[in-house]
Amino acid sequence: MVAARVRVGVWFKEEKMSLRKVVRMFTAGGLIAMAFGAFDGHTSSQKQWEIHDVNRPQPPVIDPGSFSTQDQPGRPPSDAVVLFNGGDLSSWRNAAGEQAKWKVERGHMEVVKGTGTVATRRGFGDCQLHVEWAAPSPAHGEGQERGNSGVFLMGLYEVQVLDSHRNKTYPDGQAAAVYGQYPPLVNASRPPGQWQSYDIIFHRPRFDRDGKLVRPARMTALHNGVLVLDSVELTGPTAHRQRPPYQAHAGKLPLTLQDHGDPVRYRNIWIRELPEG
Ligand code: MG
């Protein structure tokens, strides 16, 4: 305590700061911190609010929607951006920037072999993503050639879509793997033809002004409601037989779904953008 007092005393002397100046500085800092806190009712503001502070901003009220059944897709949360609700592909384009050419019928979209990856027209960064998919039934092919597609966050980071029901392949390439990096914690696959869900929480990588990586991408995912990726740190973009390093990119990029030649189906796709903390 004495040492601390001495050190503070020295600091005052060196900086030639009056007590009033110091108080003013701290007040300004507090106001700025409070302003930021108003946009973030969570972790970074823990220090700025007293415990049980009634003046702390109330979280926004939303309608959480409903869960899906095999017969019926659920209702997205009211604050989600709906990317596909079974109607049309107006939120999607192909690699050439034209309207996506995948098939839409009976409330789902289906990969049409050779028409290529589809990408959202909008870009996204940090997000919560919900995707439902079904592998072709009856099953066809083995390993990576059975019900292969993929959900690419920012078009770069793939969560594998594969019929992994009684279908062995390399673990970091099965359903719900971060392709080539992390196998899922468990294989929670349903049989082909049944609807399956991914709920993914993604934090994009951060780069400094010189394009140097300052924080890798991070992902948590649930497959059919079961935790399969627990806040894993991505090594870089996903690729086949390689782990390429990060390369600086924009803060928001389109989400893409892979055409791997198999008629995988998708329905009920929605995304919630997360505050960029
Ligand atoms: Mg794939």
Image: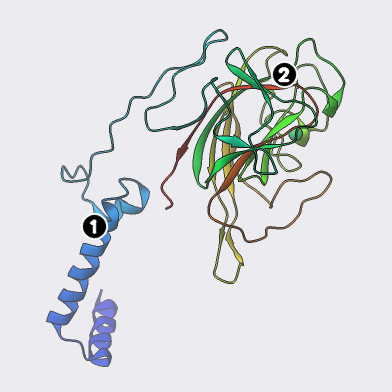
The residue sitting at the left extreme is 20
Give percent across and percent down for residue 197: 59, 23
- Among the 4 quarters of the image, the one containing residue 119: top right
> Which residue does the numbered mark 2 point to in the structure image?
135
- Give the amino acid type for the residue marked by disc 2 in the picture: Ala
**Above or below — where is 99 with respect to 69?**
below
Q: Which is closer to the viewer, label 2 or label 1?
A: 2
> Residue at the location (60% across, 12% down)?
106
Residue 251, horizontal then vertical, whole percent: 53, 55
Q: Is residue 138 left or right of residue 176?
A: right
- Disc 1 marks which residue? 34
Q: Is residue 199 left or right of residue 246?
A: left
Q: Secondary structure at mark 1?
A: helix
Q: Nearer the viewer, residue 266 or 206?
A: 266
Where the N terminus falls, by quadrant?
A: bottom left
Of residues 71 and 172, the one drawn nearer to the viewer in this rendering: 71
